[in-house]
Image (cartoon, rainbow, N blue to C red):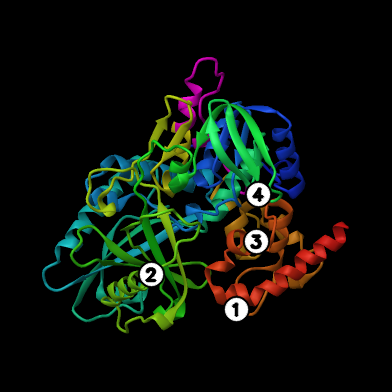
Amino acid sequence: MSRMTGARAPAGAATFLTAARRDGDLEALADGMEVDVLVVGGGVTGAGAALDAATRGLSVALLERRDLATGTSRWSSKLAHGGLRYLARGQVGVAWESARERATLAKVTAPHLVRALPMLTPVRGRIPPPPSIAMEVGVRLGDTMRALSGTSRRRLPGMRRVSAAEAGMWAPALSQSALRSALLHWDGQLEDDARLVVALARTAAAHGARVVTYAEALELHARGARARDTRTGRAFDVRARHVINATGVWAGGLSPALRLRPSKGSHLLVRAERLGGPRAALNVPVPGSFGRFVFAVPRSDGLVMIGLTDEPFAGRPPDAPEVSDQEEAHLLETLSTALERPLDPGDVVGRFAGLRPLVEGDAHSTADLSREHAVHEDPATGVVTVVGGKLTTYRRMAQDAVDVVAARAGVQARPCHTASLPLVGAPPHPRALPAGPPSRLLRRFGTEAAEVAALADGRPELLCPLAPGVPVLGVEVLVAHQREGALDLDDILERRTRLGLVPEWREAATAAAQALLDERAEVAA
């Protein structure tokens, strides 16, 4: 895959999401400005749809009832994966779409946010068990899709068998008991899901989209929506020729005809040193469940993420589902079967869960429901709702939703070209990132890393962690407030920096982050 348009990532003030810009956009909408497309939902699919529509030459407004990436889009497994699990279930179309979109993310859209992740599956006993055989077959099929999607082996190496000794080098905590060998293959890992959403929203804003957070859509109709500014309580109407509902598991509240069956995915976080500082993710089969694994993925912040449950969820979807004791026990027990020293709840430093907006089907278990997305057009109002899918395929979901609008009579829209459009911070090639800024800033801000570092303005302490043992730097608080649409401390700690993933980190850094915001407010005054 190549960049057919030779497009470069947008930069500068046109991309900045500030409180003043948000308020001005809200006032324009409340005063009666009509837009071509209103997108409701500020997660990855909604931000992707706003960008897609804006880059086709349509005027766009995006409403999000809270902050960007408040819902499911910050609770993912943070993988840009090729759909190996879906191959095991015969969902070849989903796997192929995943492989193509992974290639787009890693090569064009956000190469600074995506990196290769080695993944290790242990094989025990003289005769490989069925899960290991299925994994090997699936990986080989996935490798074929990798090649067809345009991802080179230099970016994602092919699968190989490794000895028990080498497996221990990749995953030091792995039990060597009866370990015969291991399968080593590679997939994509996302630095942070919420950072991807912010980059999408800023890029959409650079193309003219009006991004308004803390504005809740109360009702959707043929000519727009009734909405409410949640910061002031003021209700207002938004005039729009077309409406896209991209609110995920909450879509049914605005489009009652939809039949969704949410699935809950839970994750745990442990310190990397507890598992010996692994260099590869570890895959452990779930007993009695074909094609399902619990994984332990090393992260760049010194943590290892353990997941993933896949359980049906009933009731009104909350913004932040909780990990149950049973889910935590299941994850720890399953992973511990492959470890020299079992994990226990005392090793867990953070927990998070998210809800996937799966489309209702005939499968008994949500684990068996297809991850294909669906686009629904309400015959009475014309509201277009997009649901299903997953993080990796957000771009295609957004394209399909906007395609429905673009095909309508009287709509003059250019063809979609988001597959060749880099986001804010994306380098023209992986080696084009600037030298000098801290590696954390390069991973999270890409080509903007030097600008972010410069916000320290001669204060070296702002290029240091906010508190001992916390990975976030002081300048990250400043850039979140000045450029990324963070309106309060919670936006910064929970979604821009992700300190909220580990309660101990959030507690340690809160005072320092608040002091920086207070200082900023004094300067502005």
Query: Residues at badges 3 and 4 in contact (C-beta under 8 Å)?
Result: no
Q: Secondary structure at mark 2?
A: loop
Alpha carbons under labels 1 and 3: distance apart: 18 Å
Q: Crowding near pointer 2: few (<14 within 10 Å), some, many (20+)?
A: few
Disc sitting over residue 324 in the figure: 2
Q: Amino acid at mark 4?
A: Thr
Query: Which residues fall within the magenta stretch?
Result: 401-426
Q: Amino acid at mark 3?
A: Ile
- Marks 3 and 4, the one that precedes in the sequence: 4
Q: Residue at x 38, y 62 (%)?
A: 118
Residue 421 highlighted magenta (yes or no):
yes
Q: Residue at x 47, y 67 (%)?
A: 299
Q: Select label 3 or label 4 by which is in front.
A: 4
Residue 7 in the image, given as x and y percentages of width and height? 59, 35
- Marks 4 and 1, the one that precedes in the sequence: 4
Alpha carbons under labels 4 and 2: distance apart: 30 Å
Q: Amino acid at mark 2?
A: Ser
Q: Select label 2 or label 1 by which is in front.
A: 2
| Mark 3, residue position | 492
Main SS class of the magenta portion in the image:
loop
- Marks 3 and 2, the one that precedes in the sequence: 2
Q: Secondary structure at mark 4?
A: loop
Residue nearer the viewer, 437 or 52: 52
| Mark 1, residue position | 469
Asked if residue 217 is positioned above or below residue 180 in the image, the reply reads above
| Mark 4, residue position | 230
Q: Secondary structure at mark 3?
A: helix
